[in-house]
Amino acid sequence: MGKGRPRAVETGQNSGVSLTGSLSIPSGPVYYPSDEEFRDPLEYIYKIRPEAEPYGICKIVPPQNWNPPFALNLDSFAFPTKTQAIHQLQARPASCDSNTFELEYNRFLEGHYGKKLKKRVVFEGEELDLCKLFNAVRRYGGYDKVLKDKKWGEVFRFVRSRKKISECAKHVLCQLYREHLYDYEGYYKRLNQQRVKSCKRGIYEEAKSENKVKVSSSKRRRKNSDHEKVKLCKVEEEQLDQICEQCRSGLHGELMLLCDRCNKGWHIYCLSPPLKQVPPGNWYCFECLNSDKDTFGFVPGKRFTLDGFRRLADRAKKKWFGTACASRVQIEKKFWEIVEGSAGEVEVMYGSDLDTSVYGSGFPRVNDQRPESVELKKWDEYCRSPWNLNNLPKLKGSMLRAVHHNITGVMVPWLYVGMLFSAFCWHFEDHCFYSMNYLHWGEPKCWYSVPGNEGGAFEKVMRDCLPDLFDAQPDLLFQLVTMLNPSVLRENGVPVYSVLQEPGNFVITFPRSYHGGFNLGLNCAEAVNFAPADWLPHGGFGAELYQLYHKAAVLSHEELLCVVAKDPTCIICKQYLYLSAVVCHCRPSAFVCLEHWEHLCECKSMKLRLLYRHTLAELADLVLIVDKHASEEIPQSDGLQRNISCSNELNASKKKVKGAHVSHAQLAEQWLSRSCKILQSPFSGDAYANLLKEAEQFLWAGSEMDSVRDAVKNLIEARKWAQGIRDCLSKIENWSPGGVFEKVPLKRVKKLLCVNPVPCNEPGHLKLKDCAEEASLLVQDIDAALSKCSKINELELLHSRASSSPIHVKQSEKLSQKMSLAKVWVDSARKVISDKRPAAIEVDILYKLKSEILELQVQVQEAEMIFDLVSLAESCQDRCRSVLNASITLKDVEVLLHEMESFSVNIPELRLLKQYDIDVALWVRRFNDIMTNVHLREDQQNVIDELNRILEDGQSLKIQVDELPLVKIELKKAFCREKALKARDTKMALEFLQHLLSEAVVLQIESEELFLSLSRGLTGALKWEERANDILARKAEMSEFEDLIRISEDIHAIMPSLGDVKAAISVAKSWLNNGKPFLDSDFSVSPAFCSLLKLEDLKELVSQSKFLKITLEQQSMLETVLEKCMEWQHDAYSLLQDVKCLYGVTDIGDGRSNGLISKIEHLVNLLESAIKDGLSLRLDFPEIPKLQDACSALHWCNKVLSFCYLSPSYEDVESLTDITEHLSMLHSSGNLLSSLAFGAKWLKNVSEVIFAPGKCKACKLTDAEEMLAEYQGISISFPLMVAQLADAICKHRLWQEQVHQFFSLEVGERLWSQLLQLKEHGKASFFTCEELDMVLSEVEKVEKWKERCMDAVASFTGDDKSLLCALQKIRESLDRSLYVYEKSQGSEVAFLCMCCTNVSEDWDILTCSACKDCYHLQCLGYKNHAEQVYVCSYCQLLVGGSILHNGVGVLRHNGKYSDLKLLSELVSADENFCVRIEERYILLQIVDQAYACKKCLTEIVDYDMHYYDENLFSSISKKLAAALKATGLAGVYDHQSYCDLERALARYSWRFQVARLLDALDKGLEKPSIQQIQQHLKEGEAMNILPEDHFRLKLSELLDIGLQWADRAKKVAADSGALGLDGVYELITEGESLPVCLTEELELLRARSMLHCICRKPYDERSMIVCGQCGEWYHIKCVKLVSPSKVYICAACIPGAENLVSALEPSDPERCTYTKFVEPKTPSPRHTKPRMRPKKSESSLTQKMLSIRNNSMFGHPSGIDRLWWRNRKPYRRAAKKRAELGSLSSFFHRQQ
């Protein structure tokens, strides 16, 4: 399979710039080399280069069998990364320095406007960076282009990258730029244009300009385009005041350029890139232009392992595309959105440029450690592979072989670990190298490439699209940090190609081709450079580029050229062969010098070739040149003398020829004489060849052989001429029409004949000359025929002559072409003439035929006929044009069309007239169709549209039509009918109807039914209008107006007066509706439950009634209501005046003696009557609230005066006080109210003290005494309240004395009940004091302590919630617990029930047979005495070995105990109580008892912990049972003690289980397994059971015995029969007698003892086959099977079979011995073939037989065992097969 066609793996859409849409990026070529082509990468790349290099990139898919292993360890591989800000690869501002921009900008303002920028420009509350704004607008083409393309949003992103964009912000930004920077932009453009022009002129032009540079002592000044003075450096003759920052030299001051900000200098040729001359305007160095804080680059990131990097990459991909599989188009589109800045900020990590000499290569290398999973052969194969990137740069044919030091990235591959969106930016390789990239694994890479020959166009587009970036960094493309959408490049004419690299693919980039791309996900790639021979020109370009930009080169290109261009060396002496060398065809790559030519090979000397760079003559010239330039000390003639002597020696050298010696010069003279003779003799090719071959011995000599060289040239030319003559004559003589030979061109013949003089004697020269003359005559005749108008037969005659001539003349081709054209023309003309169909011939065809025949100049008869047709067509065209140019009438057109109906030529004008005529006919037909019953149609709007279209089409007709005026009239009628239809369906104004009917009269359509119906409706409407005007004028009744409305509903028109009528009715009804509440006679509803009416509304209604146009009776009724309201208002005003007089009374007293109360009551009655009358009118009189306030105030005064004779409650007084505040706001003046209010306030204060001390804050005793003093200043008397206040003061003083007496007693004498009584009396007192606070504090302290105690003993509190009872219960439980401990220690204690404290003799008792403790039957839940012996739940530990956690004590308290720690804290709390508390003393006893129990339990646990001897087992069990019982009975819980007890019980349970296991072993009931023993030991170790424990020691001994035997058994089972069967049986017997159960190992040994096959061997690794009938296994080799068959039947199952006999070999006595008495047996379980397990009965029988066999082998190893196996056969096979096997017994004996 060759390289074939390049085809793209995938074609898709690449996302372009977001503003310009997406463009399709064509794919680069893809190659699929065959295995043969894949052997040499450089050769294959050279093969595909002409086809692939125009793309700049290609992909190579290796053959399927090429699959190199990945050499790195994925688990330990770690690498550093770089952080890539993808959103800034393109859409980033330049790293400009704002200070430099500000300096330049202010200079511009000062030079043009005479001012500077005084204040900062603010945008969105922040200072606007004008430098960034200016660069952003430049990026998008300047202000005008940004404004036209609406790109202020993109500009905004550069200025405020992190803020939200609004339309308002865009507009403001545009205005700010227009105001501040627009003029500066124009200035900047003009300055750049001048710089470009000046650069083009060059330094030479500058030298001749008017302002010539003069080196002087003064500083140079130069002016820019705006006449600004700019500094240049000055150069002094003696001292240099300025040096270049690059080369540190002060020379060439006229070429020194000073920065206009920092004043530092640079030579213009030291800049990167260099300038040709000093630029106009201000100039700033790159340090001042660039800002360090904005400099963009890839920041070093974290160091990752591959697993950590994979997690990061997976999270990134999931974030962008979720869990779905994203396509390349989606990823590519999103990538370019991010690059262009429209998708937010995105940063990724990229493990790029990883040196494989440090981090390792993905390809195998010789010195790397080979993974165990990779085979050695495969590893070595790919280590040597030429496609291994570690080998590629050093392959044969690569120029980099000459580089002897490793260059990372060039000679040493780099590794790349990428993730989603990680990118490699636009660049080409160092030194324009080729590059090869291999993707080891992972997601694909997307590549873009620009061909190398388009590099200049690419750079131009980059500079145009990113001008600000290139201004800041002219070497931007060297930085590898910038991307640009390939769609932008394609839009600007730069070809771009795309390649999708998948795992296992190579990508090749060609020299100078810009390429970039990104990763579609996690992947790993490796890349390296290489340089075949065709790279050298590109390498020179790269070296010049480094020099131009002042960049350090990776390697020396000149050194590489010198090393590569070295001459070959002699394989013998290793000297360089420059001037000459000897080579042979058998070894074309081997060279030797002239001295060692005999050692080159064994070929004859005639097969050797001498290679020389210069002839001896040229060498002599070189010697002369050297002598000419030699020093004067050496005579000039020496060299020449040496040359002459050398030449003389050569000439004097002699050669033996035919027995005589002849000199070299003589041989040359003889050769020259023979050459002269041979030139005069007839030509012979062999003679010439021999002579030229002889001349080779003279050509290498000096100038004396120049005559030989000239003769050789003459001979060569003569031979070439003579061979040409002979070749031409041979072709002429042998040529025949249709033969093999071609004609001889006349041009070649003439070239040979024009040689003068002839170089040699060739006889065929004259003959060829005759042939040439005949051909010349033919040429003359053809030229004559072609130059005039000839007949067709004359041309045919000349053509036959030319065809029969053996000499080819060019004129014959013209003749043939003319004849063929003539024939084609005749055929076309005849077709045209014969076609008589109307309009079948296009007029253009006629004109074409006419022009062709005139050009051909051939006489044919068809030409006249074509000319006649053309003249007829032109006549017809003239007539048609005359009709078309004039006013066209239908009659004229029809006449002309009738005349030309049968004309066969298709005239365009005639065709146009026909179309006009057709259009008119169609138009008339359409008009007539519309006019059919047009007046009856309801869709008059459609009629209007159709007529409009008809009218428009009729006006566009080219022919005048008589029906066109009728269309306009019908259109007016249609409009009129359309308006009539609208009037019929919709009410219209009377004026509209009158105008419509008059228009119908004018159009003469008034008699149509539509217009007649409109006329009748108009008459009725006019009559209604007259009546309405009459009614409105005379103010009629409501009924008349309503009658008019009913009549108007039947009239289909809009009446002018209808609105006035409706308005009159509407106003009247609205008035009635508003007045209805005032006229309603239903006063049953209480005024309090309905809303009041406004008096102003009533007045307004009465005034409105005068303007109504309708007469109503309700007008007089409303006037009457208004009069009643005015009378009530007058009466209310009089009452309010009386109340005001009452408020001024000063003599109050007790209210009865002066009649004040009776006056108040009388005035209250009058007020209530007036309020009732006012509310009955249901109007919102403003006097009613005043009357109500006055009435309530008088009620309050009356109530306050009533308290002078009775004692009020606190609620009564409090209600008075609330009203008092309200009255003080309403009635600010008046002596009566103020006096009563002061008295009510005093009453409230006294009531709070006497009646409501709990509700209000208690007052002090002094405050009560002050209240008594205030009473003297009140003008009202309250005798009852004063007496009660004095009594309360006296009682409080007595309580204070009781408190002092209580606290004077001793603490032990103070009772808790007395303190509580004092508290109750004190809280019931009216006043506060220090004594009350002290009593409450002491009570609260004691109660809090009791609450804490209650929480601690909550589980023991009963229904009475008594703390004392709960503590007594706990104390009783601890008594029983201590009883249990004392009993366990052997103490005699009184009888106690373990469940309760009841000592009643009436309760039945049950005694535990083990511990002798007593229990009530009622406590145990038994109704009667148990018949069997009773054992309590605690003592079951002695029998079962495990503790029941649902014991009696636990059940008694439901597992809820008081915490000992909390009780101790309560006892130790020092509260300093002032009274004696009984509960505290009981609690102290409980804590002491609890600690005594804890001490007993600790002793038992310690005893268990240090217990080793098995004899004490029963003792510890009793102690633990007692501890468990005591713990369950105790009502106090200690966490640490409980945990210790649980661990002790666990240890006891473990010992009990181990003891039971050992007991079973001793009794022979059951053997423990290894696993059981190991599990017990593991549990014992976890329980901290000491190693010296009796039971642990026993288990360890058993484990050691079992493991030792198991290890031996496993080794024997795996020895493949090394140990004899006797040893195996002994080991089995030993294992069965062990005290440990080893079932698995015994089964392995039993399987090991099984024998198989006729060889009676145990199972081994040899191949076996099973018998299909008996199931026995046989070795394939033993039964002599060539290959395993699907079904095998053994010889024992087939009687008389001979294969079993032949299987035995006499050479194996052991096998023969076993054969006599061994029976086949089932194979080992380790065999690959699955076997069915034997039945139970069979297994037992087999065990029995094995035991018999074991006994017999030791006693009788031969006869007894043989008999045993024969007796066993019926068990394995049927009787028939046993007989068959018995027939072979004689054979067995014979073999023995």
Image (tube, helix red, strand yellow):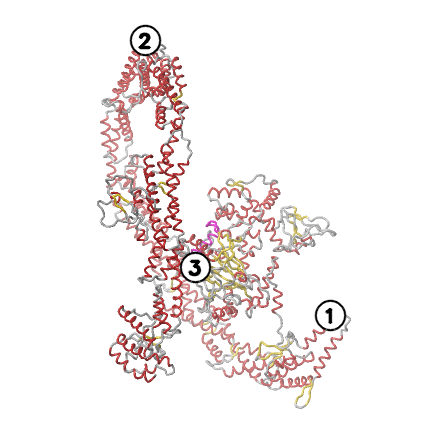
Q: Which mark is residue 629?
A: 1
Query: Position of 719 compared to 1450: left or right?
Result: right
For the residue pair 754 and 1599, the one nearer the viewer reads as: 1599
Magenta region, residue range: 329-346
Q: Is residue 331 magenta?
A: yes
C-alpha span from label 2 to label 3 = 116 Å
Q: Amino acid at mark 1?
A: His
**The residue tagged with tag 2: helix, strand or loop?**
loop
Q: Where is residue 1230 shown, x and y percent of the image?
A: 37, 14
User: Which comes sooner in the sequence, label 2 or label 3?
Assistant: 3
Q: Amino acid at mark 3?
A: Gly
- Crowd class of label 1 (few under 14; some 14 to 19; many from 20; radius 10 Å): few
Residue 1312 visible somewhere in the drawing: yes
Give the residue at mark 2.
Answer: 1154
Q: Is residue 1523 magenta?
A: no
Front tag of 2 and 1: 2
Give the residue at mark 3.
Answer: 12
User: Which comes sooner in the sequence, label 1 or label 3?
Assistant: 3
For the residue pair 1398 and 531, the one nearer the viewer reads as: 1398
